[in-house]
Amino acid sequence: MDRSSEFRRWKAQCLSKADLSRKGSVDEDVVELVQLLNGREQFFTTSSCAGRIILLDRDINGSEVQKQNYCWLLVTHKPCVKDDVIVALKKANGDAILKFEPLVLHVQCRQLQDAQILAVRSTHGLEVPLTHKGKLMVTEEYINFLIKIANQKMEENKKRIERFYNCLQHALEKETISMTSYPKEKIKEKNNSSYTHKKKRNPEKACGKYITEENNKELDNDDHDDPGISVTIFPEDY
């Protein structure tokens, strides 16, 4: 079985699986983006989050900041209010942290040149400790201030998703037009030439700045037979 056939088989298997996320479905703000990618033969999404505000309580016995040591006190994909955070904080027994996390979208790509279309990232986040060993360390006024910042980031994140969708759609349409404008022999020759050139430049170094630490770990753990490349996408300075 060639790599293209293997990729199609792997894509069909992945998209047919049940959604195992906490929510159990794709977030409303990224449905169109996910559909756009999954509608293209060279991509498929493996996980996504449109962006969220969360309040986590870390186990005081935990020695590292890891998700498995956290209790989820509050999570929302919409702007939140101070009262909800205050109520949730009353359940904290350890070190509670208020976080805003922007869009995260993991995409499996058929080949390197497909991944390069999507290989962008963002540092548009927020993470602030609020309690220590269950004791509130900040004032309600400060909590209200943080929530305003988180909500502003949520709104900006939504705008970035819309802009990213439009730019990606334009890029894919342009690619389709380009592919249909040249004879297949020329396309194959051009792709092979492009790949050979990038290979000489050391592809790991050339693409390294686009792959996050989290994805490096994922790539290290993947089987060597995997027919795709996993990247997290979102424009850093969009």
Image: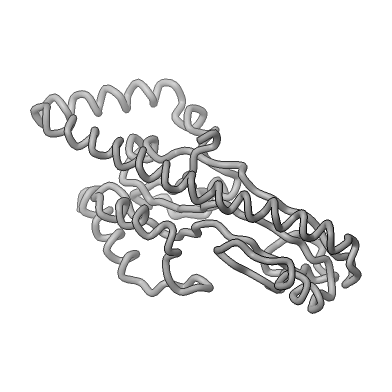
In this view, the residue in front, 217 or 12, is 12
Coordinates of residue 109 in the picture (x, y in percent)? 35, 47
Residue sitting farthest toward the bottom: 91
Quadrant position of residue 62: bottom right
171 up-or-down from 39: above or below:
above
67 up-or-down from 205: above or below:
below
219 up-or-down from 99: above or below:
above
Is the image coloured rainbow, by chain, by secondary structure, or in one colour?
Answer: one colour
Q: In this view, does 45 lie to the left or right of 79?
A: left
In this view, the residue in front, 201 or 64, is 64
Residue sitting farthest toward the left: 183
In this view, the residue in front, 165 or 58, is 165
Coordinates of residue 9 in the picture (x, y in percent)? 25, 60
Tell me which residue sits at (30%, 42%) in the image: 169
Coordinates of residue 185 in the picture (x, y in percent)? 11, 27
Tell me which residue sits at (33%, 54%) in the image: 44
Observer able to see residue 225: no
Tell me which residue sits at (57%, 51%) in the image: 102
Q: In this view, does 140 lie to the left or right of 199?
A: right
